[in-house]
Image (cartoon, rainbow, N blue to C red):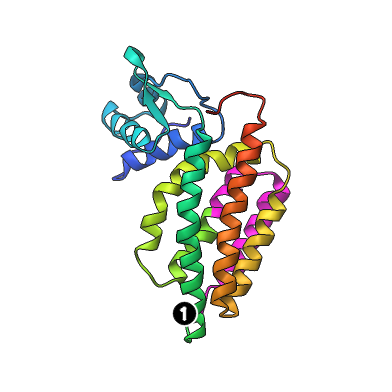
Amino acid sequence: MLPLSARSSLTDRVYEAILDEICNGAIEPGTHLVQEQIAARLDVSRQPVQQAMARLKADGLLAEVGRRGLQVTPLNLALMRHHYDIRAALDGLAARLAAMAVRAGAEGPRRAGEAILRAGAEAIATGDIAEQVRQDAAFHRLIYDASQNPLLADAAEPHWRFLRRAMSQVLRHAQRPATIWQQHADILAAIVAGDAESASRKAVDHCLSAADRLGNALANSTDGRTT
């Protein structure tokens, strides 16, 4: 971890710093997190660290273990599937509404979507897993915004926080990121064409196939850090 300069959203930045290290494997499942040590590494007081760790606990990424305090939880495959089931419903609705908005005359997300697709391809080419996950989230956020329903992005956010860790772990071991991005391109094409049924179906299939892919990869993982 690099020291963080003080900003108004310091708790958010501490949260993201810890989450990034959990996602990229720098902090492994079972690790006991000590507030004082994290505060020293990030050059912040204990208060934002305490608040950030409480949020991570609420997200299911940390858990109380006896008197040892908070530890990083193993990935829970059943819980991951539940998150994906909900995300599939939300993403299917978002894609449907986005396509309907295009059909009704809205400009649509074509240009922004193509830019994200290019950024995703570049991240694959360089092997930058963190950037792949960031661009993946950016693509879906674009669809939520294009749906013109302001509640969708907030509804999906807690599921993204949980799944970001699973996505990062699998991308470190799996070799199929191009498939994911082809599915993104297909969803975008259906939305731009104003095909609500196809866009919704492709978005749902994308989420459910991701759940299957991640579940299989994690179940076959040799590190044993899943439940």
Q: Residue at x 45, y 53 (%)?
A: 86
- Amino acid type at image mark 1: Ala
In the image, taking residue 24 as reference, residue 9 lies left or right, namely left
Question: Percent x, y for residue 67?
Answer: 32, 13
Q: Farthest residue in the top direction?
A: 67
Q: Nearer the viewer, residue 29 or 129?
A: 29
Q: Is residue 67 magenta?
A: no
User: Residue 68's spot in the image, x, y percent?
Assistant: 36, 14
The residue positioned farthest toward the bottom in the image shown = 105
171 lies above or below 42: below
For the point 32% across and 40% down, the residue is 10
The verdict on residue 128 being magenta is yes
Q: Is residue 44 above or below residue 104?
A: above
Residue that appears at 47% across and 45% down: 82
Q: Which residue is mark 1?
A: 101
Q: Position of residue 9 (x, y in %)?
A: 31, 45
Q: Nearer the viewer, residue 125 or 177?
A: 177
Query: Left or right of 158: which side holds 189?
Result: right
Q: Which residues are magenta?
A: 107-136
